[in-house]
Amino acid sequence: MVFPQPQNKSGLSGLRIESPKKNEEQTLQNNVCEKLKKNINFQRFVKYYHQIMDKIFTNPSYNHISEEIIKYLDHDSLISLKTYFDSELIFSYLDSPKFWLKKCQQENISEQLFELWKEVIDKTEFTQYEHIITDFMTKILRKPTGSFQSPLHMAAKNGEMALVCNI
């Protein structure tokens, strides 16, 4: 016995309906991003959404969502993130000077300073100076927007003469 295929009420056949899991993921991402855009205090946010956040930050299949969340967090919230979740993704982002340079760019670092920092980051990538540059970038973000300094200035000011010579 052959059963007739159910037809779409609109008369359109062959429409692809997304799986509930895909819709659920997208809804979750949208909700999280909307909350973050509204500048909710991160610690209050994490307490309320801890289970969801834990799933997002510890499951590699949700990396795309974690990346979006990280974009909206301020410096203090990013540092707090390390204490809440044990995730390689978070640590790799927070230990990367390129990530912090992007955050500086969001804070309106001048184009000239951006290019100087980008050049130094490219020169020091995978060297012993990379973590020093990351520290400098995080220090820059703690200061008022207009107080961005050049890499050479920061290295000299902090007594990093070997880095000064390599810049």
Image: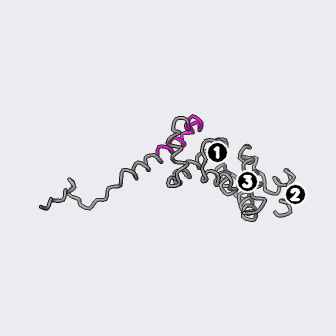
Q: Position of residue 14 (x, y in %)?
A: 26, 62
The number of numbered badges drawn on the structure is 3
Upstream in the sequence, badge 3 or badge 1?
Answer: 1
Tell me the quadrant of the picture where the N terminus can be found: bottom left
Name of the residue lying farthest toward the left: 1
Is disc 3 placed on a helix, strand or loop?
helix
- Please check the rendered image and state whether residue 36 is part of the magenta-colored stretch, yes or no: yes
Q: Quadrant of residue 160?
A: bottom right
In front here: 82 or 116?
A: 82
In front here: 113 or 159?
A: 159
Upstream in the sequence, badge 3 or badge 2?
Answer: 3
Q: Position of residue 68 (x, y in %)?
A: 54, 51
Badge 2: how crowded within 10 Å, few (<14), some, or many (20+)?
few
Magenta stretch secondary structure, dominant: helix
Q: Which residues are magenta?
A: 29-46
Instruction: Provide the residue designation for mark 3.
Output: 134
Residue 88 appears left or right of 130 = left
- Please check the rendered image and state whether residue 89 is part of the magenta-colored stretch, yes or no: no
Instruction: Provide the residue designation for mark 2.
Output: 161
Residue 17 appears left or right of 75 = left
Instruction: Provide the residue designation for mark 1.
Output: 82
Residue lying at 71% horizontally and 61% vertically, measured from the top left: 118
Tell me the quadrant of the picture where the C terminus can be found: bottom right
Answer whether labels 3 and 1 touch (C-beta < 8 Å). no
Q: Quadrant of residue 101?
A: bottom right
